[in-house]
Amino acid sequence: MTKPALRTSSEVPSNPSHEMRNALACIQQFGSILIDGLAGELSGEQREYIGIMLENAAKIRSVLDSELAGTDGLLQESKIKIERVSRREN
Amino acid sequence: MDSRKILIVDDNADIRLGMHLRLKANQYQTFFAADAFSGVAEARKHRPDLIILDLGLPAGDGFTVMERLSQIPVLAVIPIIVVSARDGLGNQKRAYAAGAKAFLQKPVNDDELLAVIRQALGEPAGMKKPTLYDQGSV
């Protein structure tokens, strides 16, 4: 059965790049399995559409490689500062 | 010739299935483990020719698996290819230091993975094993 979508804030991935890379790996893996005919022969149109899907998956990967490369480090370095404040001051 | 045995250690069932389909199409026999403890247990049981190892695993991690395997002489010689979604900066260096033959960051290109597997198994680099599709059996 397909896993349900994220439901609570506690289920939000703590490492977005890591989670996205795993999901993207599955998309690329099964896309290439389909396009290589490992799950049966495809029509020309089906191959074309999966090709489009894979091209776009490759674009996401390049974005991950370039823009999110340093994000994980930033997230790990970030700290939450908790302070007690008075409501009267608000 | 018997097909070479590859143990896939990854906690993501979809990744395991995808790798199995790709490796089976290239005449490799696959076995699976979804956590660090099972990874070592399955390696003991099947004595694979190669291990594909994720780093983020329940019941330990990929480094724990490599450390435990290195302590068992018959398993210490099995080549390990780390395939992880973790960043390659520190993990790649640490994986090589722990004895990995290669470090690939997810998502992995199939051709690249197969090339690294063949190299680790000492198979000719240029040899392309036909897929089921190539053979016309699907």
Image (tube, coloured by chain):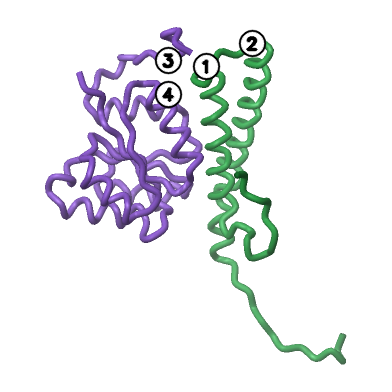
Residue lying at the far front of the rendered structure? A1
Front-most of A82 and A49? A49
Report which quarter residue A21 is drawn in: top right
Q: Colour of chain A?
A: green
Name the residue located 21 percent from the left edge and 22 percent from the top edge: B2
- Give the Cα separation between the discs numbered 1 and 4: 15 Å
B125 versus B16 height, above or below: above
- The answer to whether residue A45 is left or right of residue B26 is right
- Give the Cα separation between the discs numbered 4 and 2: 23 Å
- Give the Cα separation between the discs numbered 2 and 3: 17 Å
Q: Amino acid at mark 1?
A: Gly
- The answer to whether residue B59 is left or right of residue B40 is right
Proximity of marks 1 and 3: CB atoms separated by less than 8 Å = yes
Name the residue located 56 percent from the left edge and 13 percent from the top edge: A41
Q: Earlier in the sequence, mark 3 or mark 4?
A: 4
Residue B10 placed where, x, y %? 41, 46
- Give the Cα separation between the discs numbered 2 and 1: 10 Å
Residue B15 placed where, x, y %? 48, 39
B136 versus B10 height, above or below: above
Secondary-structure class at tag 3: loop
Q: Earlier in the sequence, mark 2 or mark 1?
A: 1
Q: Are marks 2 and 3 on the same chain?
A: no
Marking on residue A37: 1
- Circle nearer the viewer, 3 or 4: 3
Residue carrying label 3? B132
Binning the other alpha carbons within 10 Å of mark 1 as few (below 14), some (14 to 19) or many (20 upward) gives some
Marking on residue A43: 2
B39 versus A48 height, above or below: below
Q: Are marks 3 and 4 on the same chain?
A: yes
Q: Amino acid at mark 2?
A: Ser
B30 versus A18 height, above or below: above
